[in-house]
Amino acid sequence: MSKKITIEPVTRVEGHGKVTILMDDKLNVTQSRLHIVEFRGFERFVQGRPYWEAPVLVQRLCGICPVSHHLAAAKALDVIVGAGTGKGLTPTGEKMRRLMHYGQFFQSHALHFFHLSAPDFLFGIDGDPAIRNIIGIALTNPSLAVQGVMMRKFGQEIIRATAGKKIHGTGAIPGGINKSLSQAEVDEFLKGADPLNADKMVAWAQEALDFFKSYYHANKDFIDGFAHFPSNHLSLVRDDGALDLYHGRLRAVDAEGKRILNDIDYQEYTNYIEEEVRHWSYMKFPYLKHLGKEKGWYRVGPLARLNTCDFIPSPLAQAEFEQYKALTGGKPNNYCLHMHYARLIETLHAAEVIRDLLNDPDIMGDNLVTKGTKQAEGVGLVEAPRGTLFHHYRINEDDQIVMANLIVSTTNNNEPMNRSVNQVANKIMTGKEVITEGMMNAVEVAIRAYDPCLSCATHALGKMPLEITLVNERNEVIDRKLKH
Amino acid sequence: MSKPVIATTSLAGCFGCHMSILDIDERILQLIELVEFNKSPVDDIKTFTKPVDIGIIEGGCCNSENVEVLRSFRKNCKILISLGECAIMGGLPAMRNGIPVEECIEEAYVNGPTVQLNKERILPNDDELPMLLDRVYPCHEIVKIDYFLPGCPPRADLIWEALVALITGNPLKLPYEVVKFD
Ligand code: SF4
């Protein structure tokens, strides 16, 4: 008998997502889909609002990484107020925003690793679901739980100091920033009581990375064999090819490392990127126009960034990057679970950058805002923790927004997440009469590797709740399983 | 006495309110001692397995599924709290109220600068997707809500103080500084 397996809800943050898997009567997987089931309509309802509201409005789409939306919108508005991109801001303006952004990376990556992924590694993918969550970690390995909580706290405190609030702050304004740091604030972050200081955070980031590396070496077959497929990779890179999370040019490489988008100016992104709409999901499917829908889809996020960039501009992370690149002979890395490895290298990099910025006197400067000649249109991109984030606005002569277009990081990963689900479902469910909780969790592990923003929510505190319903061809429910 | 049972959910919200709960930082370890979690992202319990003392709701209702989840929370929880602006009055998602839903869909999937090639006008309409409501509803227009904690998101200290007061039965003393509306 053929059946349909529904995994619901998989995720949250732009709302719920769910997975449906169809199997034919020979128990072959014939279709698998990750559906995004909620819709907000931001592009339309922001029309008519004054442009300077955008950075504070738009972050309320996502409370998991609001700083990324805040900054992408602010960067688009930098162009609109005539401050230009990148070096157009004052040194204090740019460095304060960078500090805010790298603080966000640090807290978001720590949250994802400790609260979300570590339970799968510590307790096993098919470990007891009752303890396979952050509470299980708190009970069995309290020092690791404390480390996760305090690393996230440090990142959140950086955000509060730069943006005024830990969640949905107001630090970035069109053309700059509305405050800089005081000596006392800088001292607090550099010399704060253990563990809340920058040196400790660098050390802890290194420890988390070492923890993962030793896990990897002990479980190489599992990690390498889990889900992998060739894909294109896209991200911003600095002018000299370095990893840069705040600003750069848009580069894409194929699975072999060949450049397929050669460091373009992202103000022209519409010449290169298009989105496909599919009727079964509210999330669109972006692709590179010149390669078409079939060949042009790509991955974004930590894995993609370490595939596109030439080097990492901080010494400890660069040393780790060299080891990591050696695993694939310098070629792009296409292993899904290596995303965790890449994410932890970035966490270490973020900690180093935070420490450097805190030691830079510009961070206490008082020249905060750049002014220029007003433009009608602007595009702002940042590398959000989960990947490249696009914001694009057009205004009228009354300063009202008349057009807004967003491509959020997780949307960029829509096709690869669907491919990962399909690969895992095919591999572990084909021929199986009985679908176990461990099999469902394996599908989640594949999605979770992307740290999708639609789901970091539910994951943030544990794992995703799942419901599996088996339906026959006539759509009659024949079995229903809840996972507790 | 057994520990009070807590459940939480996020409807049409951004999950920032849940993140603000996490911002109680080290006190999370205390909270785990003080209460037991039932249906919540914390522990992955999908349906209520026992009567719940305190239900915490983030977000208003923008689709049929949100309404179902909210009603099941009312049925299973003694006390319901609307946490944050979205639950209390719809918040940012309610900015679409007053605009026909079709216009929002049209803008996102047909008019936008990166969907110019969607000439066949494919729109999300699969049976697997829940129905969008005509507008976004605050929670108290759908079910009775007992307490409202303002903020976008409410401050972590506000959440902590309110929970401890409810759990211990002590009167709630909220210093002026922790009650914020932005
Ligand atoms: S109230 Fe604010 S923080 Fe809470 S869900 Fe709504 S937008 Fe997010």
Image: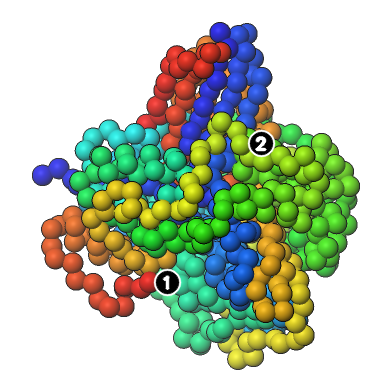
Q: Is residue B181 above or below residue A361?
A: above
Quadrant of the image for the N terminus of chain A?
top right
The amino acid type found where label 2 is placed reads His
Image quarter of the C terminus of chain A: top left
Residue at 71 percent across and 87 percent down: it is: A371
Looking at the image, residue A411 lies above or below residue A178: above
Quarter of image, res A97:
bottom right
Task: Name which residue lies at 39% across and 61% down.
Answer: B89
Residue with the mark numbered 2: A279
Is there a contact, CB below 8 Å, between mark 2 and mark 1? no
Give the image location of residue B128, x and y in percent: 55, 32
The residue beneath circle 1 is B182
Q: Secondary structure at mark 1?
A: loop
Q: Is residue B174 left or right of residue A406?
A: left
Residue, x 64% and y 19% (percent of image)? A29
Image coords of residue A388 (percent x, y) = 69, 56
- Chain under callout 2: A
Q: Is mark 1 within 8 Å of ligand 1?
A: no
Residue sitting nearer the eye, B87 or A2: B87
Report the front residue among B52 and A402.
Answer: A402
The answer to which of B5 and B24 lies nearer the viewer is B5
Q: Residue furthest bottom?
A: A366
Q: CA distance from mark 2 to mark 1?
A: 36 Å
Of residues A112 and A90, the one nearer the viewer is A90
Residue A41 visible to the viewer: yes
